[in-house]
Amino acid sequence: MAKMSSINKNNKRVKLSNKFYKKRKDLKAIIMNKNLTLEERFKAQQKLSNLPRNSAKIRVRNRCQITGRPHGVYRKLKISRIALRQLGLQGKIPGMVKSSW
């Protein structure tokens, strides 16, 4: 199990990322628009840099929803490979059985 501080920190980043998503998207669109003046684009860049760093989506870490493990996490299921195996062995995932050959 991961440290609770790491899990909480990541959850905070997720909330900030969702909160500022539209604002960051709009500012990036202004910055990338070559038809606008250089001054307008520079102001948008300054506004973007004044936003919290943790509001960037790139700073969010994929973590297991069950254990908080940061590595070996399936994006679609949002759980780690180890948690997936344990749930499969307990029979909590329909259609999943332990392989043997």
Image (cartoon, rainbow, N blue to C red):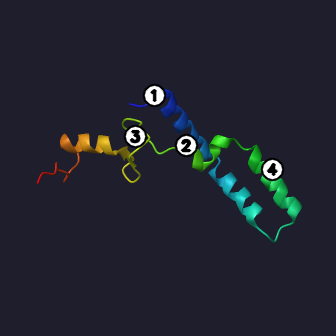
Left or right relative to 79: residue 98: left
Q: Which residue is mark 4?
A: 46
Depicted 92 relative to depicted 36: above or below: above
Spatial CA distance of label 1 from label 2 is: 17 Å
Residue 1 seen in the current view:
yes
Left or right relative to 16: residue 69: left
Quadrant containing the N terminus is top left
Q: Would you say the residues marked 3 and 4 are in contact, meaning their CB atoms lie under 8 Å apart?
A: no
- The kind of residue tagged 2 is Val
Q: Would you say the residues marked 2 and 4 are in contact, meaning their CB atoms lie under 8 Å apart?
A: no
Q: Position of residue 52 (x, y in %)?
A: 69, 41
Seen as rendered, the residue at the extreme front is: 101
Depicted 79 relative to depicted 9: above or below: below
Q: Earlier in the sequence, mark 3 or mark 1?
A: 1
Which structural element holds mark 4? helix
Q: Which residue is mark 2?
A: 14
Q: Which residue is mark 3?
A: 65
Q: Position of residue 9 (x, y in %)?
A: 55, 33
Check disc 4: other Cα within 10 Å, few if <14, some if 14-19, many if 20+.
Answer: few
Q: Quarter-wise, where is residue 14 in the image?
A: top right
Which structural element holds mark 1? loop
Q: Position of residue 72 (x, y in %)?
A: 38, 46
Depicted 28 relative to depicted 85: above or below: below
Q: Earlier in the sequence, mark 3 or mark 4?
A: 4
Q: Would you say the residues marked 2 and 3 are in contact, meaning their CB atoms lie under 8 Å apart?
A: no
Spatial CA distance of label 3 from label 1 is: 13 Å
Q: Residue at x 63, y 47 (%)?
A: 56
Q: Which residue is mark 1?
A: 3
